[in-house]
Image (cartoon, rainbow, N blue to C red):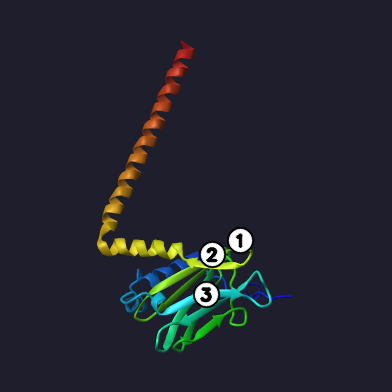
Amino acid sequence: MVLDPRACGARQVGWTASLLVLASVTGLVGCEQGEAEGRGPSIDSVVGVAVRPAALDSGRAVLQVKNNSGQQLSAVRLSLSDKDTRQQFSATLAIGAGQTREVGWREGWSVGTNDLILLSADGYDGGGFETFRTADGGIGLRPSEILADFRRLKKEVDDGNYRARLWQFWRWFLWTIVGAAAVVMAIGAWRKARAESRRG
C-alpha cells in the first residue's frame, strides 16, 4: 500500500493563506521578504523545475528542483499546495551549483494533479507552476495561470492602471444597478396595467 502524506495528517490551510503566499511571491505584499524579492531576474533563470513519476505510485510524482546557476543557492523557498484540498507544504532548499534536489513522499509531499508550486529566493522574482493529468495518465507541469494573473495585477498596480480599471468596474456596476432597477420598474408597471385592464 502506498501512503500519501496528505492522508496522514498533513496540515490543512485556508485558500486565503495560499493567496497570501502568491501575493508575497509576486511582491504584492510589502513585507521584508516581499521587498527583498521581485527586484531581480526571474528565479526561472537560475532554477529548473521538473517532475518524474514516483517509484511506488504511477499516479503520483516527485518534484525536481535543479540549480542551473554556477553558484550555491542557499535558500530557495518552496511552497506546494493542493488547490482541491487546500493542503500545503513548504520547505527551504539549499542547492549546490548544477545539483538537483527532489521533493516527494519521503520529504513530506507527494505531488499530485492540480498542485500549485511556488518558488522564491532573495534577489529573484518568484516563479510558479501547476500540475495536471496528462493524456497517458501521468503528471505534467506547466506555468501557473494563477501566478500569471497576480503578475498582471501587480504590473497594473505598479503602472497606476488599477485606478482606470476600478473606475471601469464601478461604472459597469452602477449601470447594471440602474438597468436592473429600470427592468423591475417596467415589470411592475406592466403588471399594474394588466391588473387594471382585467378589473375594467
Q: Amino acid at mark 1?
A: Ala
Expressed as whole percent of the image width and height from the top left, the position of residue 158 reads 27, 65
Expressed as whole percent of the image width and height from the top left, the position of residue 184 reads 41, 31
Asked if labels 2 and 1 touch by Cβ distance under 8 angstroms, the answer is no
Q: Residue 83's mark?
A: 2
Q: Could you tell which of marks 3 and 2 lies nearer the N-terminus?
A: 3
Q: How many marks?
A: 3
45 w.r.t. 130: above or below: below
Secondary structure beneath label 3: strand
Secondary structure beneath label 1: loop
Identified at 39% across, 68% down, the residue is 23
Q: Residue 50's mark?
A: 3
Expressed as whole percent of the image width and height from the top left, the position of residue 182 reads 36, 32
Q: Residue 62's mark?
A: none
Q: Disc 3 and disc 2: Cα gap in Å? A: 19 Å
Query: Where the N terminus falls, by quadrant?
Result: bottom right
Quadrant of the image occupied by residue 5: bottom right
Q: Could you tell which of marks 1 and 2 lies nearer the N-terminus?
A: 2
Identified at 36% across, 65% down, the residue is 151
Quadrant of the image occupied by residue 56: bottom right
Identify the residue under disc 1: 135
186 w.r.t. 3: above or below: above
Expressed as whole percent of the image width and height from the top left, the position of residue 6 reads 62, 73
Asked if labels 2 and 3 touch by Cβ distance under 8 angstroms, the answer is no
Q: Could you tell which of marks 3 and 1 lies nearer the N-terminus?
A: 3
The one nearer the camera, 23 or 193, is: 23
Label 1, residues with CA under 10 Å away: few <14, some 14-19, many ≥20: few
Q: Disc 3 and disc 1: Cα gap in Å? A: 18 Å
Secondary structure beneath label 2: loop
Label 2, residues with CA under 10 Å away: few <14, some 14-19, many ≥20: some
Q: Amino acid at mark 2?
A: Lys
